[in-house]
Image (cartoon, rainbow, N blue to C red):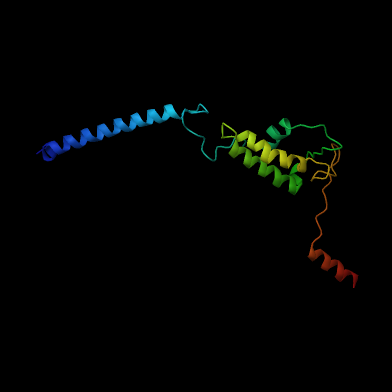
Amino acid sequence: MSTDAAYGDDHDWAAEETAARIARLELRVDELDALFPDPAGVGGQSPPPDDLRASGLDAWVEDYFATTFTRPLGGEWRWCRRWREHPEAVVRLDALWHAFETLRRDPDTGMAVWLRDHLDHHFVILLGSRGPFAQCTAARHELLSSLPTAQGREADHLAET
């Protein structure tokens, strides 16, 4: 006895019902595609979450940040070519990079949000004359001293006695 004969009419009905459901679903997908066109033009596929534009922080800073957001250095604006040695700068640049990688995927307002909420805030601190590069010039790299801590004061007190 063949499989078709064992299921009889029920098998034919199930196959036809499955085909009809698939056709209805395909129609719904087409309708949804018409209602919500792909604004990025990438065929409805968004990049995977780990698909970063830059391969790392160094590449993003060197190839994007430092070449895109330029200012005349000196006076109000400071930068250090050895930025990796400034812990606060690394933290702020890393935060900017990760926010950039997330928000750049939003084709509508992502970059505007990144500029307003992230870059505009951190830029004036990062490159400001009182920021992490405050003592650096184009020719000189000088790290700021660490902030004093309670442990440091206790050490000073013990040294005085």
Q: Position of residue 22 (x, y in %)?
A: 29, 33
Q: For the image shown, how many numbered marks are present on the structure?
A: 0
Farthest residue to the front: give it: 35
> In the image, is 61 to the left or to the right of 153?
left
Rendering coords of residue 52 (x, y %):
58, 37
Q: Is residue 86 above or below residue 156?
A: above
Task: Specify the quadrant that holds the C terminus.
Answer: bottom right
Residue 70 is left or right of residue 97, and the answer is: right
Q: Residue at x 56, y 34 (%)?
A: 106
Where does the N terminus fall, quadrant-wise?
A: top left
* Location of residue 63 (image quadrant): top right
- Residue at the left extreme of this rendering: 1
- Image side of residue 69 versus residue 47, left or right: right
Q: Residue at x 82, y 68 (%)?
A: 154
Write down the quadrant of residue 124 in the picture: top right
Residue 43 appears left or right of 79: left
